[in-house]
Amino acid sequence: MKHLRPRAAALAVAVTALLAPAAMGQTLTLGSAAPVTTIDPHFHNVGPNNALTMHIFDRLVERDGRARPRPSLAESWRVVSDTVWEFKLRQGVTWHDGRPFTADDVVFTFSRVPNVPNSPGGFQGFLRAIERVEVVDPHTIRLHTRAPHPLMPLDLASVSIIARHAAEGAATEDFNTGRAAIGTGAYRLVSYRSGDRIEMTRNEAYFGGAEPWARVSYRIVANDAARTAALLAGDLDLIEQVPTSDLARLRRDNRVTVTEIASTRTVYMAPDYSRDGGTPLITDNNGQPLPVNPFKDVRVRRALSMAINRQALVDQVMEGAATATAQWLPEGAFGYNPRVRPRAYDPDGARRLLAEAGYPNGFRVTIHTPNDRWPNDSRLAQAVGQMWTRIGVRTQIEALPWTAFVPRRARIEYAMQIGAWGSSTGEGSNFLVNTIATNNRQLLTGANNNARFSSPAFDALAARGSATLDDERREAIWQEAVELFAEEEPVIQLVQYINTWAARRGLTHDPRMDERTIAMGVRPAR
């Protein structure tokens, strides 16, 4: 008998594990690149949480992997008048505990969304247009709006519906323990271990038909190398955010399949607008806080933009898994403006603009970034910092784990941060209303405006576009907003991601533009 050397034997075991049909045990094991911070579907509008809660909860309207709306808990909808939408709810749907889903649960959900305690950035922007909810019968609702709102179906595709009987009076922690996490989704929550894994079991009574996987294990593997190694060892069936350094190798490996799609997620640098000056995170070259906030001067923002070599970020940091951009949606999306291109790389021009703005010797700034949330997040921040230092804006990088980064971001503690936004609707309004519009609890805008930027011009464009029924005119408004955005640069765009996954052979995967990794998109290959 021929004996294998230890290294060869280990490889043979890995190959055998990798080629075993994933459906044999009817358990699907997914590797998430970022932690899920809660099971509460209304607490924090971030990608990992949204991907996970899609398994447990449904929305009135769903979006497919290309961001196209389709019926879900609402089987149909129609415009009754310019300010009234009618939604027919699906009959025969039950919650995980067997109780029936009705219009009352929708009313309860809509009342809870804007009022989740301590939310660092919620979903209230998606309900901003609704003035009142009229219950016509247990399976028909009418949504009355203050003005025409053509985006209603797309907006509602971001709001998970929860059960009044399970969640009334419940806190976010009650969802994490499972007590309030009673949904209508394809999977039921079994257990949630923060920072480690979420275990789910199939909902046999799911209205969309039972899924092929009896159990789903949703594991958090933040380290890039560990995620790839776990896939190759057979410990994971599918991983997201394939490390850019591993992409070429995995594409050549016939034991795995790489799937990819243009992302709706854009990456940018976000300056702080909440302070007029005096922060120790922005100082002169002697370490003294500047008396005024330099980022409120558009010349400084343009100089910082001109100092960034975006193509170098694409080629050297992202290794081709991104495109340079000056706007927040990929080419072909509704509202993308083909006339807007990234500001040209011009470090000499950037120095001249800084001098014109009163900073001939530059200044110092601290950049904050997560180091485990988005592909190459801290590497992008470091590269931008080096480029800024070359024009006299000397940078210090402070990289934090995502779970530590978010609470400080919610408290508006950063002078400059890297940010990323994945537009869930695939239309120009999403980023504009939630991230650029003024943070206003009464109008339910700017819920994720962590820079606290505020501009009447952008607020007016967001309001006007959201109330324009004609598609051609509405897209022209979004394109106008993109042009203003590229001129003013309230945040400084860097790149648009390309979403990537890798799966064991024997599985098929439907990639999503919103980057969400969901068991419902994975099937045993025929």
Image (cartoon, helix red, strand yellow):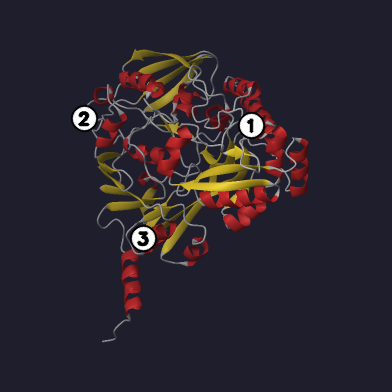
Identify the amino acid type marked 1: Asn
Identify the amino acid type marked 3: Ala
Of the residues under marks 1 and 2, which one precedes in the sequence? Answer: 2
The residue lying furthest to the bottom in this view is 1
Q: Nearer the viewer, residue 13 or 412?
A: 412
Q: CA distance from mark 1 to mark 3?
A: 46 Å
Q: Which residue is mark 2?
A: 98
In the rendered view, tell whether residue 474 sits above or below residue 288. above
Give the mark toward the camera: 3 or 2. Answer: 3
Q: Nearer the viewer, residue 482 or 207?
A: 482
- Find residue 31 and name its label: none
Q: Secondary structure at mark 1?
A: loop
Position of residue 493 in the picture relative to residue 356 (left or right)? left
Q: Position of residue 471 (x, y in %)?
A: 61, 26
Q: Residues within 10 Å of mark 3 (few under 14, many from 20)?
A: some
In the rendered view, tell whether residue 297 sits above or below residue 269. above
Q: CA distance from mark 1 to mark 2?
A: 56 Å
Q: Position of residue 439 (x, y in %)?
A: 53, 24
Q: Which residue is mark 3?
A: 230
Q: Secondary structure at mark 3?
A: helix
Q: Residues within 10 Å of mark 1 (few under 14, many from 20)?
A: many
